[in-house]
Amino acid sequence: MSFFKSSKKAEDVKQGGSNHITSSGVYPVTLLAPIVSVSKGGSTSIDMFVDHAGQKQVIYGNLRITNKDGSPNKIGAKIFNQLMIIADVEEVSDPIEIDLPIGKKAAIKTVAALEDLADIDVMMRVQMEYGIYQGNITEKKVIKAFFRAGDNASAEEIVNDEEAGSAFERESKYLDNITFKDEVTPEQVKQWISDKRPKGTAGDSAGGADTSEKKPSFGKKRAFGKKKES
């Protein structure tokens, strides 16, 4: 009788654990490339291609900076503005066309990136959000705040020359918060995650938002990792 049989599957021989962001908390990340996406309805959002502890990943659909009518989205635009303050960037140029390894199995995908905010170290607070869309449980990583790497200063503390870290400490009590929408329950989500996130597990609800996109306008194309000319 065999006591244990070896496996050569990729997931079984991979060295070390995953550093994918999968829970609420504050994470030290390098912003590799903020990506501009425009929905078919006309709203503009910023996705974040980041590196967390060597794991490159995209935080999708978080910062909606304009609404469908072109007006500023107060919540998303505010957080994006705070990121600019923390990064010490006064103005962000139009996005440029760039190729990133963010497709399935790291396939190259052409996107519109904001190079003025590339390669910046920050502390990023993420809150998990679960809902239902077309009968499926959905999982979203919502960016709630940014803080400066090194001293955890907030944008307000930087602008007002206040002691760094107070806002970070105040928000620390909320780091484990999780949002449940569309009547999905914590028990459903827990089972869904345990079952490895199968489809069709949330009944007939059609909740959720339009996630379709159209291509935004680009500036001059450059290769990923190549610095812009000064």
Image (cartoon, grey):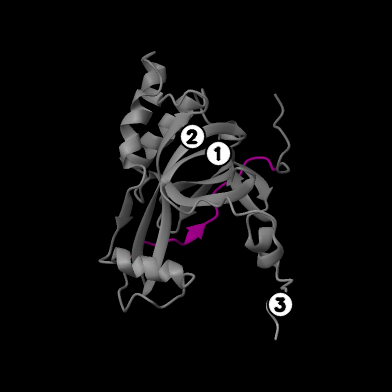
Q: CA distance from mark 1 to mark 3?
A: 38 Å
Which residue is disc 1 drawn over? 29
Could you say whether the residue bearing mark 2 is in a helix, strand or loop?
A: strand
Residue 196 shows in the view: yes
Amino acid of disc 2: Met
From the image, which quarter does the N terminus lie in?
bottom right
In front: label 3 or label 2: 3
Pick whichever of labels 1 and 3 is earlier in the sequence. Answer: 3
Placement of 105 over or under 176, stated as above or below: below
Res 5 label: 3
Overall secondary structure of the magenta stretch? loop
Pick whichever of labels 1 and 2 is earlier in the sequence. Answer: 1
Marks 3 and 2 close (CB-CB < 8 Å): no
Magenta residue check for 220: yes
Res 89 label: none
Residue drawn at the location 61% of the way across and 54% of the way down: 17
Residue drawn at the location 35% of the way across and 36% of the way down: 172
Would you say 42 lies left or right of 116 here?
left
Q: CA distance from mark 1 to mark 2?
A: 6 Å
Residue 95 occupies quadrant:
top right
Could you say whether the residue bearing mark 1 is in a helix, strand or loop?
A: strand
- Percent across and percent down for residue 221 are 69, 43
Res 123 label: 2
Would you say 99 lies left or right of 45 here?
right
| Foreground of the two, 29 or 217 | 29
